[in-house]
Amino acid sequence: MKIFDVHIHYPRNWENLDEDTAPMVDRLAEVATAAGITKGCLLIGGRFGPSYERGLEVASQYSDLFIPVAVIDPEETDGEGVQRLYDMGYRGLKLIGVARPYDEPDYMSAYAKAEELQMPTLFHMGVIGGGLDYSITHPRRDAAAAQAYQRWLAMLDRIPSRDVSASRMSPLHLDTIANRFPRLRIIGAHLGNQGNYEYAASVARWRHNVSFDMSGGETIERHALERKLIGTEIGIEKLVWGSDCGMDEIRTHIDRFEAMYDLLELTEDERERLWWRNAAEIYGLEPPTFAEE
């Protein structure tokens, strides 16, 4: 079984942002390969990431495994900036925490260039997660959660507050972008995220070039089953797999999805599409397939 992971964050030590990341990427490659990942999109750069140059230098040591994907701020990166990233070696884009809605007219030049260069673009959807998932834990009743909360407090003085809003990162914005750029390969993260599932399903239903990844953790996975988001509300061919978790959790994440696919009684072909082929077609590693008359 080949596994394509569309959502792997470049590893950082959030308590020491100056720490050399190369050893962490070495370990990520080892852990991901052992977990069964055969190809993964490594999301590089962004507000707290390494420079695009340094991140690409480190990731290039594992070119058989990682596809370099640049995290961009469309307030700063326009079409010319996307071209520069492509020329450096980046083959996809990721957006999150934007200052204005994803379908802001000023952002369109970046999307136009990504369409021209065939760079798949991953959009975070909905509320941005944090270190604690209060739907399953709380510092008052869990020691590990209490320690995570204290680490978050300690980092507040080192990391400035964020000007972000889930309202700027809705699946409905992908509808605008998909209509404007019908050949741009668009992936919305987290099945649209909580509160957005119906919007995500509607966009996936009618826009040829929009897919959604199934990352986001156990709460979203539970919703995927309860709300029949896999194969019913959102067609199998419109879904891709992403881990979006700590490297030591990747194998457990894969195991949970295997159990989900068993519960859904998916066929081998459907599983192969979710694990590999859908994403491989988006990134040009597999030719698209069509039914014959």
Image: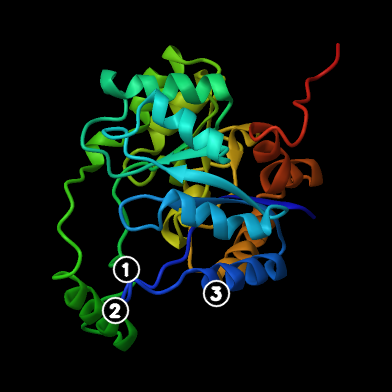
Q: Nearer the viewer, residue 114 or 269?
A: 114
Q: Indicate which disc residue 148 carries.
A: 2
Q: Indicate which disc residue 131 carries.
A: 1
> Does the residue at mark 1 contact the one at mark 2 (Cβ under 8 Å)?
yes
Separation of residues labelled 1 and 2 (CA atoms): 7 Å
The amino acid type, in three-letter code, at marker 3 is Pro
Please determine whether, in this image, residue 84 is positioned above or below residue 266. above
Q: Earlier in the sequence, mark 1 or mark 2?
A: 1
The amino acid type, in three-letter code, at marker 1 is Gly
Query: Is residue 165 among what the camera can see?
Result: yes
Per the image, label 1 sits on a secondary structure element best described as loop
Q: Residues within 10 Å of mark 1 (few under 14, many from 20)?
A: few
Q: Earlier in the sequence, mark 2 or mark 3?
A: 3
Separation of residues labelled 3 and 1 (CA atoms): 23 Å
Q: Nearer the viewer, residue 76 or 210?
A: 76
The amino acid type, in three-letter code, at marker 2 is Ala
Q: Earlier in the sequence, mark 3 or mark 1?
A: 3
> Does the residue at mark 3 contact the one at mark 1 (Cβ under 8 Å)?
no
Horizontal arrangement in the rendering, residue 38 relative to residue 72 (left or right) = right
- The location of residue 180, given as percent across then percent down, is 42, 13
- The location of residue 183, given as percent across then percent down, is 56, 17
Q: Residues within 10 Å of mark 3 (few under 14, many from 20)?
A: few
- Which residue in the protein does label 3 denote? 23
Residue at x-position 32% and y-position 76%? 16
Per the image, label 3 sits on a secondary structure element best described as helix
Discs 3/1, front: 3
Per the image, label 2 sits on a secondary structure element best described as helix
Q: Residues within 10 Å of mark 2 (few under 14, many from 20)?
A: some
Please determine whether, in this image, residue 1 is positioned above or below residue 278. below
Please determine whether, in this image, residue 137 is positioned above or below residue 192. below
Horizontal arrangement in the rendering, residue 271 relative to residue 98 (left or right) = right
